[in-house]
Image (cartoon, helix red, strand yellow):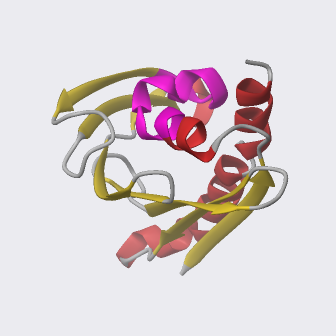
Amino acid sequence: MAHAQNSVIITRPAAEVYAFLADGLNNPKWRPAVISIELVQGKVGEIGAEYRQQLKGPGGRPIAGDYRIISAEPGRRLEFVVTAGPARPKGDYLLEQTAEGPKVTFTLDFEPRGLMRLMGPMIQKTMEAEVGQLTALKAVLEQG
């Protein structure tokens, strides 16, 4: 199984951090691989919300990265599953309150099957880079 996790503390109110994460239309503000994104079903931040997302793939070619929110606990946890693209991990944002602000932990898990197992190291590297983007999220939110 491929697993990647990263945490940061963001000095903003937890409700504000959660709302920003729950609205997938904010993804291009902190995830440089996102080319485009649109809400295609449901309501922002609610279970069942589906986003159509294009990402920069190998060689800069666009690849699908559509996802659906599968669990939402405002101010605390947001879970999603990728529904289109070469790898389809499950993701989780967990917010835990600290004295400085919420500690945001971003986790990605993926169980490669079949020929996808051969791509395991590349998938792991991509997932680690993705959770590493929390530093960009922190910078965007703390700048205002």
Q: Work out which residue is located at the far left of the displayed protein and give it.
A: 41
The image shows residue 43 at horizontal and vertical percentages of 21, 34
Identify the residue at horizontal 19%, vertical 28% (top origin): 40
Q: Compare residues 67 and 55 and report the one nearer the observer.
A: 67
Q: Is residue 30 magenta?
A: yes
Q: In the figure, is residue 142 to the left or right of 49? A: right
Q: Is residue 48 magenta?
A: no
Q: Work out which residue is located at the far front of the displayed protein and give it.
A: 99
Q: In the image, which residues are magenta? A: 19-35
Q: In the figure, is residue 72 to the left or right of 119? A: left
Identify the residue at horizontal 55%, vertical 22% (top origin): 28
Q: Compare residues 98 and 110 and report the one nearer the observer.
A: 98
Give the quarter of the figure containing the C terminus. top right
The image shows residue 141 at horizontal and vertical percentages of 71, 28
Identify the residue at horizontal 58%, vertical 74% (top origin): 2
Specify the quadrant of the image occupied by residue 124. bottom right
Count the labels in the image.
Answer: 0
The image shows residue 54 at horizontal and vertical percentages of 41, 28
Specify the quadrant of the image occupied by residue 45. top left
The image shows residue 60 at horizontal and vertical percentages of 59, 25
Identify the residue at horizontal 55%, vertical 64% (top origin): 108
Q: Is residue 121 visible?
A: no
Relative to 25, is 134 above or below? below
> Mostly what secondary structure, the magenta segment?
helix
Q: Work out which residue is located at the far bottom of the displayed protein and give it.
A: 1
Q: In the figure, is residue 140 to the left or right of 49? A: right
Q: Is residue 86 visible?
A: yes
Relative to 142, is 127 above or below? below
